[in-house]
Image: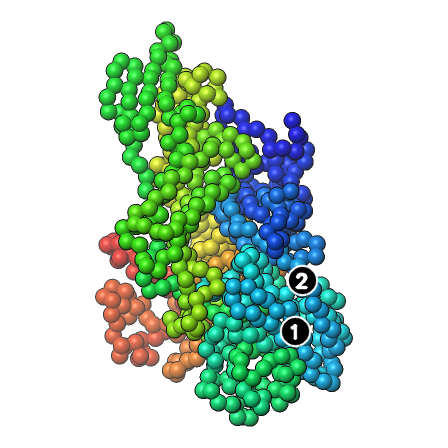
Amino acid sequence: MDPCAAPPIDGTAGVSFAEAIRFLTEGACPRQLGADVGYLEATRVSVARGRVLDEAGKPLVGAKVLAPREPKLGQTTTDAEGRFSFVVLGGGSSRLRFEAQNKLLAHRSVSPRVNRFVALDDVVLVAPSAKATPLTFGATEWQVASGETSRDASEARTAVVLVPPGTRAEVVKANGDKAPLERGSLRITEYTRGSTGPAAMPGELPPASAYTYASAFTLDEVGVEPRVSFSAPVITYVDNFLHMKVGAPVPAGVLEDGDTGWKAEASGRIVAVLPGPSLDTDGDGQADDAASLAAAGITAGELASLAKGGIAPGKSYLRVPMAHFSAWDLNWAFGPPFDSVFPPNGDGKGGPGIPCFGSGGSWFECERRTLAEDLPLVGTGVVLHYHSDRMPGRKDARTVTVPVTGAVVPASAKRAEVSVTVLGVTETKTFAPLTPNLTHTFSWNGKDAYGRDWPGQTVAEVRVGLAYDGVYQNVRSFGAYGDGEAVTGDKTRQEVFLRRTYELPVGARDQTALGLGGWSLSEHHVYDPAGRVLYRGDGTTRYAADLGATLRIVAGNGRFGGAGDGGQATQAELALPDGVAVDSKGTIYVSESLGHRIRKIEGGVISAFAGTGTQGHTGDGGPATQANLDTPRAVTVLRDGRVCFAEQYADSVRCVGRDGIVRTLAGGGPKPITAAPIAATRKPCVTCGASESKMYADHKDPLVRQHYEGGGIDKSKMRATSEVQPQCATCSNRQGGRLSAYSRRKGEGLDP
């Protein structure tokens, strides 16, 4: 037996998912090297599978697959067929990087459920362009560099870069270090060319962005990873090969750090070149005057350099200023045709196996079409049991029927694609032309991705998509959703799919592995941890899913406050918990809107993560635990590990990085006060008598209770200073908590 082959699965007992895939990271010859097995929790491990190819569609052998932001996952390489299996933690998101010699990098995100295989679309790695143009930074003349012309089903297009005189460059490394760059050989490599273009993208696009045009701008002297920034933007022109409207914005995004995803840049514009030469930037067909050109950052020197780059009058171009070189994407939003529909839902379940008639020790289950029989073992109280749906010849448990179309098929629907993935093996079927009420029958062979017989139940992940020609829509910035207005008469370069995804149980227990000819002892039960199914020896089956959800308190003792840090979360006080998020390691983050903090629950222990408990908007650039937050509400964990939250009364979104530093991501500071506040800052707290540097002018309890109780409030009293009282931060928070609890109890019909 090959010691590096996947070991067979013991069919006499249930096998967990973690046990079945352990050979990938452990054993005589693990395929994923350098993985920290202690980091790979058995209840969460999942496997990402896929292929890496070159532009000709041939397998890339030995391509490296890793997750740079999760070094404990180690790395793996592709096999002779270009395939890979990479173990990740399910229930979160991992960013995978694909590397191969003399190829540009590619990145993909995976977000599998726990204990699942996830199938990635093919990844194509692209070789840098063979054409290199030398540039001297800081030169006194305009310089022109052009890429290779791309030709495919779309019109031919060429990217041309104009470098203004005096432009200086510097290399910016991942750690922030900078170094000046005097010369460089520029290569412009388009990803979006030919039939492999979608698979060759350096990273998946935002959900609202249509596949359009993307290129890598790299300099031989610095490699493909570092960013090269300029003292002034260089100007890039690309043929308007999709006939976008002149004057329309060109949404631009960059993948300067592929491990974090795309980032929006300043949009460019569709321009028409007119004799002179001059430019029309607003679509009126007339040459813009000097003031309009200057406002758009277009100089006489740029106009004089157009001819050097082959940018000719009578044509239109995508014009985009670039402040740095990296992977750039220029695209628009998209939408399906107006008559488009989603595929029908197919995630229903069949009925139970109900006995319909029987004789003696055998019976039939009509709905499941199974035969069962009992043979008593004399003097033991035990019976031998047979159930036909636990035999390897029984195929219906491995068969899934997938609805493809409904009763009405839109005229714009071109075809349907159905893919079913079971244990890492994907089968895809295409249907065209389409007719009403189409179905697809899928039969699983009972094996996993490594050719091993699977002893129990698992899930079939079904994805059904209807393909349409998409419509490019006008949009102001990269990644945003369109406004519904078509920006060109051309269809989108890549078809638009409306998809429906769901899971269905598939497979059943194979009793023959017990060595009793397919029979079982009534007292001998087998639990399948992967399928979460208990197969009882008497033929009955119990499913964990039928037990329903279980409600469990993970934090809070029911009292308002902020005490309890460093202890058990269930014994801690909370101050109006509002948002909850969970990271890939299972750590829970809770925002407390009246506690003005984000707290963290790890291993059942609660601690402060961000905020001091004092309301405010301070501390940017410093430790998050020393910053003041202003009513944090929603909280989320990004795939790069940052924990972000919205501050309601600061109109801001802030994030805490892996380094524990808080930074504002969007917005900026507290709302302006439009009404004169009462002089509460010098008065003692009416509740506890404390005098602090910052006090709160709160409405009196009876007035706010009136609002909670009746749903309305006396506006004249609300504006009267006589109805406002000074409170310290602690008492103000407690008042808010009491009133919120009062409102909740009233809503539940309880005596407040």
Neighbourhood count class around disc 1 (C-alpha, 10 Å): few under 14, some 14–19, many 20 upward: many
Vertical side of 488 occupied by 543: above or below: above
- In the drawing, what numbered circle is on residue 146? 1
Residue appearing at x 33%, y 17% in the figure = 373
- Residue 11 lies left or right of residue 82; in this view the side is left
Residue tagged 2: 128
When asked about the image quadrant of residue 83, the answer is: top right
Q: Is residue 342 left or right of residue 43?
A: left
Q: Position of residue 370 (x, y in %)?
A: 32, 25
- Residue, x 35% and y 36% (percent of image)? 546
Q: CA distance from mark 2 to mark 1?
A: 14 Å
Q: Is residue 93 above or below residue 492?
A: above
Residue in the image at 37% along x and 6% along y = 379
* Local secondary structure at mark 2: loop
Q: Is residue 647 above or below residue 527?
A: below
Quadrant of the image occupied by residue 545 = top left
Quarter holding the N terminus is top right
Tell me whether the residue at label 2 lies in contact with that at label 1, contact meaning CB atoms closer than 8 angstroms. Answer: no
